[in-house]
Image: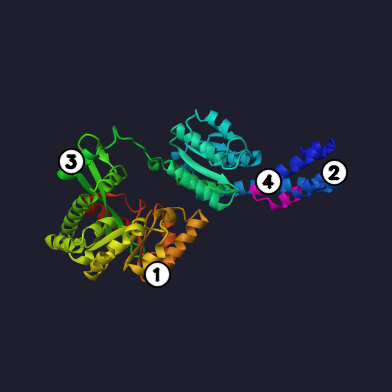
């Protein structure tokens, strides 16, 4: 196109294609070629086509250099000892990929990179509309550019929501990382299986690493209940104690020893099956039932902890408590101590987790109870740290012993600059205040290594274990110790 524009003495066309090629070169990291295109673009705007001749020749040379470099990279990748394992991981979970990008150069490179990784079914589209027509195929992964004409990447995702797409999403953009981060949160809000947000240019090895992490078992399954849970059903459930408590392990970052568990309540409905907290906790809070539900969870957790300790499993239990529950019950500290006596436990065996968002509204009426809990030896944790807006004041005014970093910042720290900055700052702050640091959302060995490097003390997440019934912890612990011995 550039040659055609020059041959036809068409300055406007030369300007257009030089600009387009400049963007493509920048997107794949070819800065020298991009700079040459920029100079051609400027001369075309001035209608000085004769001056572009040496630059067009220079651009030809740069394209040849790029082709040679790309071939060399592909040869080196073929020789890589890790490629076979990576390709096996990709082939197991990725059968087809759709690339949606209006930049034909970037689109072509992504398609070539994917095929080079052994993915036979690779589809491509130059717009969101064209991409939607290809969604009739069984697409496992969608790689979508955010900034496109007519239909941008965000609108494309919105259409995927209406089509109930359940595959994986990889966002691609040359935009600021904060825009990528916002789009990632949008994808998570719609319960997409979000894999990564990648900044252009994307190298094949980076793409391979991202695709190798895809696991079909991690695709969120969104199941709607046969009907909404009614207040009467919840009242009956609490009266009959239809709830079970699951427990998620928390391990020492360095010794890999089991330190404790977090209690997570589930509703075992007699007709509707397993119901997760998001479907009934708000209803309990809105109708004054959260205190009674909390009593059930605390009692069950203490009883389970007593059984574990009798088996020689010396750990702590963390329980989520609404700040309002503490504020409404003046004798809350005494009630906790009484339950500890019933179950033959010590105060240091228990950690009460209070969400940062809840602290913002109810702290004034709860502060005296929180102080009394600490005086009695109960540990206090600030949960979901980083999601509220009055964090520093709460840390200064409440005697917390533990800071629990929200999983949103842990899971994205490896790929998102903002999340990494918040994670590092939170850990440093907790260290300066002498608090135990817990990281939620540890889903990979890379997350573990990063948190260890930053000095986080305790880890929790799917990489370690999913929540489990209390009776399964002993068997899990034996397997965990065996796996740690072998590694």
Q: Is residue 29 magenta?
A: yes
Residue 250 shown left or right of residue 233 in the figure = right
Residue denoted by label 2? 47
Q: Nearer the viewer, residue 368 or 62?
A: 368
Q: Is residue 95 magenta?
A: no
Q: Earlier in the sequence, mark 2 or mark 3?
A: 2
Start-end of magenta stretch: 24-37
Q: Earlier in the sequence, mark 3 or mark 1?
A: 3
Regarding mark 2 in the picture, which secondary structure is present there? Answer: loop
Across and down, in percent, residue 399 comes to 31, 69
Residue denoted by label 1? 431
Q: Earlier in the sequence, mark 4 or mark 2?
A: 4
Q: Earlier in the sequence, mark 1 or mark 4?
A: 4
> Badges 4 and 2: C-beta atoms under 8 Å apart?
no
Please state which of the two labelled residues, at mark 3 or mark 4, is closer to the viewer.
3
The CA span between labels 3 and 4 is 63 Å
The furthest residue to the left: 342
Residue denoted by label 3? 236
The CA span between labels 2 and 3 is 81 Å
Q: Is residue 485 visible?
A: no
Q: Which residue occupies 71% across, 42% down?
A: 20
The colour mode here is: rainbow
> Badges 3 and 1: C-beta atoms under 8 Å apart?
no
Q: Which residue occupies 37% across, 52% down?
A: 463
Across and down, in percent, residue 360 comes to 36, 59
Rendered image quadrant of residue 2 = top right
Residue 189 shown left or right of residue 14 in the figure = left
Q: Earlier in the sequence, mark 3 or mark 4?
A: 4
Across and down, in percent, residue 236 comes to 18, 41
Categorize mark 2 by other alpha carbons within 10 Å: few (<14), some (14-19), many (20+). some
């Amino acid at each position: 196109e550039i040659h055609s524009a020059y041959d036809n003495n068409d300055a406007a066309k030369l300007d257009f294609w030089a600009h387009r090629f400049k963007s493509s070169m920048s997107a794949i990291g070819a800065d020298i070629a991009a700079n040459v295109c920029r100079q051609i673009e400027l001369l075309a705007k001035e209608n000085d086509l004769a001056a572009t001749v040496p630059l067009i020749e220079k651009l030809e040379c740069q394209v040849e250099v790029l082709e040679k470099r790309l071939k060399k990279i592909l040869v080196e990748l073929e020789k890589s000892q890790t490629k076979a394992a990576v390709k096996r991981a990709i082939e197991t979970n990725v059968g087809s990929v759709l690339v949606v990008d209006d930049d034909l150069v970037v689109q072509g490179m992504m398609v070539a990179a994917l095929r080079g990784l052994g993915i036979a079914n690779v589809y491509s589209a130059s717009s969101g509309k064209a991409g939607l027509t290809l969604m009739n195929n069984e697409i496992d992964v969608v790689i979508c550019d955010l900034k496109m004409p007519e239909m941008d990447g965000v609108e494309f995702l919105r259409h995927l929501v209406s089509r109930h797409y359940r595959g994986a999403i990889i966002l691609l953009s040359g935009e600021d990382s904060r825009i990528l981060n916002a789009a990632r949160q949008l994808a998570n809000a719609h319960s997409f299986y979000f894999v990564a947000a990648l900044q252009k240019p994307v190298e094949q090895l980076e793409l391979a690493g991202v695709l190798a992490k895809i696991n079909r078992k991690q695709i969120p399954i969104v199941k709607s209940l046969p009907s909404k849970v009614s207040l009467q059903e919840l009242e009956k459930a609490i009266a009959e104690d239809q709830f079970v408590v699951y427990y998620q392990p928390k391990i020492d970052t360095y010794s890999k020893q089991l330190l404790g568990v977090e209690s997570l309540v589930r509703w075992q409905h007699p007709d509707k099956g397993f119901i997760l907290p998001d479907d009934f906790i708000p209803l309990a809070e809105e109708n004054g039932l959260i205190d009674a539900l909390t009593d059930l969870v605390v009692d069950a957790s203490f009883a389970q902890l007593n059984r574990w300790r009798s088996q020689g499993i010396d750990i702590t239990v963390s329980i989520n408590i609404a700040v309002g529950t503490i504020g409404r019950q003046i004798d809350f500290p005494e009630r906790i101590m009484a339950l500890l006596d019933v179950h033959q436990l010590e105060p240091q065996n228990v950690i009460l987790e209070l969400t940062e968002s809840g602290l913002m509204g109810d702290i004034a009426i709860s502060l005296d109870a929180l102080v009394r809990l600490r005086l009695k030896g109960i540990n206090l944790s600030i949960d979901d740290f980083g999601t509220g807006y009055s964090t520093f004041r709460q840390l200064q005014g409440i005697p917390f012993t533990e800071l629990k970093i929200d999983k949103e910042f842990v899971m994205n720290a490896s790929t998102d600059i903002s999340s990494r900055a918040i994670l590092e700052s939170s850990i440093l702050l907790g260290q300066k205040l002498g608090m135990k640091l817990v990281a939620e959302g540890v889903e990979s060995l890379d997350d573990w290594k990063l948190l260890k490097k930053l000095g986080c003390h305790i880890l929790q997440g799917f990489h370690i274990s999913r929540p489990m019934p209390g009776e399964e912890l002993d068997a899990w612990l034996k397997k965990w110790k065996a796996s740690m011995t072998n590694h």
